[in-house]
Structure formats: structure tokens, C-alpha cells
Amino acid sequence: MRRPVLFAAILAFAALPVFGQSAPEEPHISPEGVRAHVEFLADDLLEGRNAGTRGHEIAARYVASRFDAMGLKPGGADGGWYQQVPLTEYSLDTKVPPTVSIGNATFDNGREVIVGPATQPELAQQSLNSDVVFVGYGIDDKKLGRDDYRGVDARGKLVAMLTGTPPGITGDAATAAMASKPAAAVAHGATGVIAIMTPESLQRYPWATIAGYMERPGTGLAEQGDEPGITVYTTGTAAEALFAGSPKTLAQVMAEATKPGSKLRPFSLKQRVAITRASKVRTVNSPNVLGILPGSDPALANEYVLVMAHLDHEGIDPTLKGDQIYNGAMDNAAGTATMLEAARAFVESGHKPKRSILFAAVTAEEKGLLGSEWLASHPLPAGGKVVAVVNLDMPILLYDFTDVVAFGAEHSTMGPTVAAAAAKMGVKLSPDPMPEENLFMRSDHFSFVQAGVPSVFLVTGFANGGEKAFRDFLANHYHKVSDQIDQPFDWKAGAKFATLNYRIAAEIADAPQAPRWYAGDAFGQMYAPNAPTAPAPAEAAPEKGRK
């Protein structure tokens, strides 16, 4: 998901508050406060808050003004509220269609090959003729016992790999393995990836869906060092052509891939691949908005609990008839409102937590978690380190929820903290009701998981009518222009959700020890292998067969 432009905050009226020593049992968060934030952020004036546009800048100024009025400390660069995130906006140049040749055969883009656009200006015009090595599923993970690159030299070459993960690698381990593939290709010196669609992948992501996605303009970070230079998806006879003259045919590789325990040894392919593409790439800046509540304990104040919500949405689609604005009331004006009200509750409570709390409205989540990735991969302007993340993304505030789903709670000691805070409010912690959606990888907290930081992502649960409301929203309003303020919001549920997140952040901030990954957890092992761990409770123990 580029040049710094710092904007002054507005409505800077409040002086710094006087803090007491303990948090109240019931922070005062009003339904009207949540509603007011959502009404402003989801207004047509903000034109869908697309990252890098005027509407998002207005939203950022609004959040900065709220932080300022509360008396938070600016957490951005140069003593301001903003951390500018340099983005590249890119698309294929439709006047110069991409070409892909495999051996002596040429394939039209969109039919059996799909070429992705360049994401960096220096790769906008690209032509290569390269050797190719097949690397199985493209996974290099010692803890999973896999090195799909063993025995081949990928430096300066294209790597061909199967999409998805092999049998036996499921759940969290599969999620982590898939997320690591691009970085593994770069680490082995590959110039690009040829992704071979498996039948299972095509069932979940039809070819037409992938083609449509690649044809649309995209956004990435200006400093994106863990992405291969070029990505091509293949299927059908194009995928078969890759293996012509090689030790194994595509059919043999696919058959072997479905066998439990198969390692799919890598080998060099006989066919060279030639690719040309032309892309349009431009740079733009979009801000994260950062506000800090300083910690009171000198020994812990340098540790930050991050309470985060993404501020951006989908902007305007001029091709639509009628309403063209993606207001994003639930996604994610509601999450931003939750973050703002939790921040205000901390300030007005008179409680100064032991650890510092960083409140962040991040940009470009809809572009691929880019604002949070930038925040996670760059030192905080104020110094210190993030030790825990509470992420707020699209709470469905349409009913009086009686349970919540805390994605990631089972991976670290944050789980019991979340459960205890919810129990004090009569709210239960429920398991993921939609594991097939793989939601743990699809929101901003995952940028910090990849940086080794224990994280949770809270949404309202399926009990008390929640499943119907949740599934109806996903089917009829998610990423549609109908996600706007005229939905039947339950503002009392919004205040309740903000109160719960306040409690969670307060517990973590005042705990004697920062959250720890559970021993043996797939994400902890992959992204924080040297960090101290905590014994996993029986229900959180690693899955059988996971290493």
C-alpha cells in the first residue's frame, strides 16, 4: 500500500490536562461522541478519503485537531502531528500491452498470462530475457522444515512457483508462509516471480478476478525492498510451456504437489522467458496522524502501546451512475471514531498509564496496509518502540454486541488481557467465525506482526444477531457506496466498543510485563525468533504437525 508536506493542526484550544494515578472503572464515552466523528469522516465533503487526495488530507487535519484539543503530544516528524508516507501510484500503460514469450511461444496478456505493473519508477520501462528456476511453492522457512530454493541459484533469474501452500501446512503456519514468499524471492536474488496457479487457488481466485485486479491502478510504498521486480501469473498452456524439455512436466509437478510431505525439489527449467512491459508510475505523499499520551513510569515510558485505525477509504469512482463516493462509514470511520473516543477517555479519566500510548490514524490501508507498514518499519519520531498493537478496523456497529472476535489473541499473552477486559463488561471472546476469509492478514496490525510485535484486531462478534448483521454488511455494503451514515447504526454499541478498547489498552499499558508471543507460535517464530516467549496454554498450543 513523495515529498513531505506538513500541515498545521486546527482547533488547538485545549491545554495539557492534569493526570491522576488510576483509571476509572467506567470511562465516560458517549454514543453522541462516536456518532459525531463518523458523521464528519463519512461526509461527502471528504470524497471517500482516498489516500493521497484532498479528502484524506481533510480527514487527517480533523484527527490532528482532535488530538490537539485533547492535549495529546504530537508524534509526527518535526514536532508535528504527521508522519508522511511516500507512495507510488502505478498501472500498466494500456498503449503498450505487455508481452510474454516462453521458449518460442508468445502469449497475450490476460489470457493465459497476467503481467503485473511496475511498482517503482526505475522499473516503469522493463524488458528482460531470463533463465527460470522452479522453486516448488517458493517457501524458505527453517521452522517449517522447508527450503524450496535448496540446490538452485536464483540470482538474476526468474523463479517459478506454485501458488498457495503444500498439504500439511495449514492455519496460521500457512498464513505466515504465504506472506513470506515475496521476501524470500528477493532474498535469493530473483528478478521476478512467475506464479503458477494451482486448481485450488483458481477455485478461490478465478482467473478473471486476478486479471481485473492487475488491470486496475495500484499503490505501493516508495521504499519497497521486499517485492520482486516483476510478477507474472500463469495458467493453462502457458504454465505447461514453462516445463517443456525439463525433468518434469507441469502435470507431474502438480500431482507431486498434492502428496502429503512432498518437498518438490527445485530444478532449472529449460525454457527461457522474455517479458516486456510499460507502466505509469507517479509518487505522492499521504500522512499517518500520530498522537502520544506519555507514560508515567520512567522505566516503561519508552515502550508504546499502539491503538490504531486506518483513516483512508476507496475515494470516488467516476464510472458509477448516481452515487460515486465510497464514504466508508463503517470501514473505517467507525474504527477511527473508536480510536478517537478511547484517546479522549484516557485524557479525561485523569489516568496516566505507565507505558506510553500511541494513537494512530494510518493511511493507505485499502492500498495494501501501506501506512501501517511505513509506521512499523521506521523509527518512531519520538523514539521508543511499539510493544503491542490494538487495531480497530470496521467494527460492525449495527447491534448490541455481546461478544467480540480478537484476531491474533491466541498467538500471545494479549489474549487473556483481552478476554479479561471483555469479561468485566459482560462480553465474551469468540473464536474466528470466518477462518476462510484469512482476516488476520488483512488489516493494519499485520504490518506490526511482521515486525515481530504481538497484536490483536478486534471486531464485533456473531452473537445476539451479529452474524446476520455482519454477513449482510459484507454482502451488500462492504466496499460499496452504500457504506454510509444512513445505515441503522447502534451508537450505544459504538460507545461500548470504544470502552472495551480503552480497557484493553489500559491493561496492557499498566501491566508489569509487555505482551509476549506464545512459545511455538508460527508468527512469533517467523517474525520474532529471538524474542522472549511465554508458555502457550493448552488451547493455544501449536497445531499438530506445525513446526
Image (cartoon, rainbow, N blue to C red):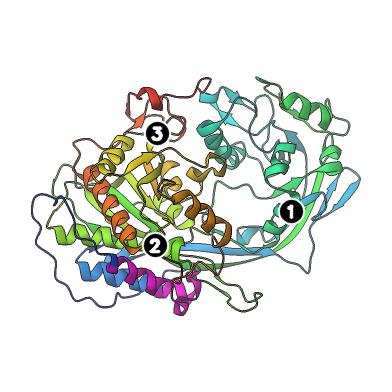
Q: Residue furthest right?
A: 104
Q: Is residue 53 magenta?
A: yes
Comes first in the chain, label 2 or label 1: 1
The amino acid pointed to by label 1 is Val
State the residue position of label 3: 411
Measured as percent of width and height from the top left, residue 56 is found at 45, 71
Q: CA distance from mark 1 to mark 3?
A: 36 Å
State the residue position of label 2: 334
Question: Mark 1 packing: few (<14 Cα in 10 Å), some, or many (20+)?
Answer: many
Residue occupying the point 69% across, 28% down = 152
As displayed, is residue 292 above or below residue 406?
below
Q: CA distance from mark 3 to mark 2?
A: 26 Å
Secondary structure at numbered mark 2 = helix
Task: Evaluate whether residue 77 shows in this view.
Answer: yes
Q: Is residue 147 left or right of residue 267?
A: left
The magenta-colored residue range is 32-58
